[in-house]
Image (cartoon, helix red, strand yellow):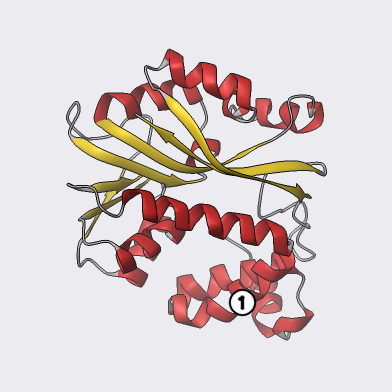
Amino acid sequence: MFLRVNPKVERALLQTPLTKLSPADAYLRGSVLEEREGFEAARAAYALADQGLYDADVRAARDFALRHVVETVRDGEGPVVDFATGRGTLLHLLLSELLRSLVATDVSPTILARVRRRLGEERISYIVADARELPFEDGSIPTLVTHLGLANVPDSQRLLHELRRVGGELVATHVFYPEDDEENRAAAREIGVEALLVRSTMLATFREAGWEVGVEIEQPVHARPTPESELVAGVRIDGLPVAPTTATWCVLRAS
């Protein structure tokens, strides 16, 4: 998440003792510090925010899914493209543990520039690109990966068709909600990501785009909406869930 804040709010974010900030505001403080001074200056704020935004079982399921993606693609050949890179959480792990060349793409040049400053350019290329319109030749990418990117790009049908056009395999961390979770489904519908939110429509959407997909290492956990900022009205770090639910963390593996 990248958010411009006015000078008064920025002063409050930076001058309030870190432990006195709400989890959302600790995250926003990290974002401001990273933009001004780099990731190391923001590390403590991000770490404290993570502890407050997500329960321990959610963090454990997330981290296990990330590790599974790394292990799955470790021994492949050719470049790995991380689409919808975001803060580079998965990219960092891949850089640390793989010898394969890496490509990071994100629609936001600001976000991608931050990741470049943090991780450097050794074995990583950075391309500003919408995941629904990638600048790659047909079938040219052996491995596509993403950390929650499937749930953050509107128009899932278009996204999966584009990934199928360029990619040989797709390995992604993902989260399902229950089929009868109408409140969160409605919120996802508003932002154009409902098709992949529940298992049945996910499977159908992948098939329609030409993918054979499997679901690995499923871990159901209780998930709650991330708390709102106390300094910036109406701001949450995550758009979903909007109501408490059972979220099933998993890895999708498609070819």
> Is 88 left, or right, of 63 in this rendering?
left
Apparent side of residue 218 relative to residue 113 in the rendered image (left or right): right
Residue 3 seen anywhere in this rendered image of the structure: no
* Residue 168 screen position, x and y as percent: 26, 32
Query: Residue 116: x and y, percent?
Result: 32, 64
Q: Quadrant of residue 167?
A: top left
177 or 40: nearer the eye?
Answer: 177
Position of the C terminus, as image quadrant, is top left
Q: Nearer the viewer, residue 173 or 155?
A: 173
Count of number-bearing discs: 1
Secondary element at tag 1: helix
Q: Tell me if 59 is positioned left or right of 63 in this view.
A: right
Please say if 110 is above or below 208: below
Q: Residue at the top extreme?
A: 208
In the image, 182 versus 109, the foreground residue is 182
Determine the image quadrant of residue 136.
top left
185 vs 250: above or below: above
Give x and y (percent) for residue 50.
65, 67
User: Residue at the location (46% across, 70% down)?
Assistant: 35
Residue at the (20%, 67%) spot, across then down = 122
The amino acid type of the residue labelled 1 equals Ala
- Residue at x-position 63% and y-position 67%: 27
Residue 35 shows up from this direction: yes
Left or right of 94 in this view: 103 = left
Quadrant in the picture for the N terminus: bottom right
Residue ID for mark 1: 45
Point out residue 224 in the picture as x, y percentages from the top left corner: 79, 50
Residue 44: name its quadrant.
bottom right
Q: Residues within 10 Å of mark 1 (few under 14, many from 20)?
A: many
Residue under the point 72% across and 28% down: 185
Residue 25 higher or lower than 208, as above or below: below
